[in-house]
Image (cartoon, grey):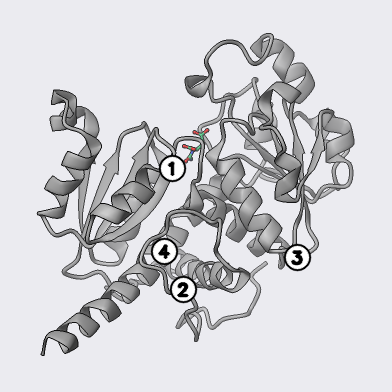
Amino acid sequence: MVPITVSLMTGPARINFHHPHLLGIEGLSASEIETLLDLGDHYVELNRRDEPAEPLLANRTQINLFFENSTRTRMSFELAGKQLGARVINMVAEASSIKKGETLLDTAMTLNALHPDVLVLRHRDSGASALLAQKMDCAVVNAGDGSHEHPTQALLDALTIRRRRGDLDGQVIAICGDILHSRVARSNIHLLVTMGVRVRLIAPPTLLPPFIERMGVEVFHDMHAGLKGCDVVMMLRLQTERMSGSFVPSAREYFHYYGLDYAKLAAAKEDALVMHPGPMNRGVEIDTDLADDINRSVIREQVEIGVAIRMACLDVLCRERGKARKQNTEDAA
Ligand code: NCD
C-alpha cells in the first residue's frame, strides 16, 4: 500500500533536508527522514513505470569508493546515479593505489582533485565517512562504516515497511541476530525510534552491545518472547568478518535458537513481514523456504526500493550543493 502523502508524479512539494552530507541517521529529525521517504516513494513509482527521472545530476560526477565487498549497495548507488544522469565512476579499492599503501586521506585528496560532486564511501572503520566529509569539497554519503551506520539501508527498510503498512508510527518491529557488529541495526534503531516505532532487539547476550536499552529499545534473548505480536521481523547476518574469537557455539546451534523459521515466526502477527538486508546465510539466520516465500518475505522488494531511496538521497544532496554553489558565485560577484 502506498501512503498518498505526496504527489507521486511530481514528488514531495516541500524538501526538508538541508545537510551537505549523509553520514548517518543519528541526528536526523522525523521530518527530514519523511522527506527522504516521500522522495523515495516518488522514485519507486517512476522506476516501476519505467519513466525517466529528471536528470538532476547531469554534468555531475559521482565516485563510488568501496573498501569492503558489496553487491546490492554498490550496484544500486551506481544505478541511482545513472538514473539521475550523473557520470558515475566506480573505484575498486583492490585495483587502486590503496593496494600500494596509499592512506585513506591521501586517496581522498587525490579524488578531491578530480572535483567530484558526490563521494559514496564504504569502509571498514567506523567514522571513515565523517573524516572524509571534513577533508573533501563534495557531498559524502556513508554506504556503511564499520559497525557504526548504514543510513541508506535503514531508509530503504523504512520505505519498504511504510509502503506495506501505510505508517511506521505504532508498529512493533523486531531486529534479530548479530546486533553487536551491525551498522544496519544501529541505523535502523535510530530511524525507527525517531519515527515512533516500538523496537525490540532479540539476540544472545554475546551479540548485544552493552547498555543498548539506552537507545530506547526493549531487549529479549528468546525469539518466541521477542517476536510475540510483532508487525515486522528484521533478520541480520552473523558478521563473522568483524568477530575476533567465537561469539556463538556453532552455526547449527545458532539456527536452532535464533534462526527464523515458520515455527518461530508463528509467534509474530499472522501477516508479519520478514526482512533481511542481505547477503543472507541460508540455514544460519533464516530458513531458506521462508526467505523465498513471497507471501511473507519482502527481501527482494528491499533491493528494488534501495535504488529509489539512493536516488532520493543523491537528489537532496545535489539540490543542497546547487544552492551552495549559487551562493558562492553570488558572493564572488
Ligand atoms: C549489510 C552491510 O553491508 O552492512 N549489507 C548491505 O548493505 N546490503 C549487511 C551485511 O553485510 O550483513
In terms of image quadrants, where is residue 155? bottom right
Q: Earlier in the sequence, mark 1 or mark 2?
A: 2
Q: Earlier in the sequence, mark 3 or mark 2?
A: 2
Q: Earlier in the sequence, mark 3 or mark 4?
A: 3
The N terminus lies in quadrant: bottom right
Where does label 1 land, which residue?
144
Where does label 3 land, which residue?
169
- Residue drawn at (65%, 49%), measured in percent from left and top? 189
Q: Report the Cα–Cα distance between label 3 and label 1.
A: 26 Å
Is the CB of the residue bearing disc 4 within 8 angstroms of ligand 1?
no
Looking at the image, residue 286 lies above or below residue 217: above
SS type, badge 3: loop
Q: Can you give x and y, in whole percent of width and height, for residue 297 in the image?
A: 66, 43
- Residue drawn at (47%, 21%), measured in percent from left and top? 241
Q: Earlier in the sequence, mark 3 or mark 1?
A: 1
- Residue drawn at (16%, 53%), measured in percent from left and top? 112
Q: Earlier in the sequence, mark 4 or mark 1?
A: 1
Q: Is residue 96 visible?
A: no
Q: Local crowd at mark 2 within 10 Å, few (<14), some, or many (≥20)?
A: some
SS type, badge 2: loop
- Please indicate whether residue 145 sits to the left or right of residue 248 in the image: left
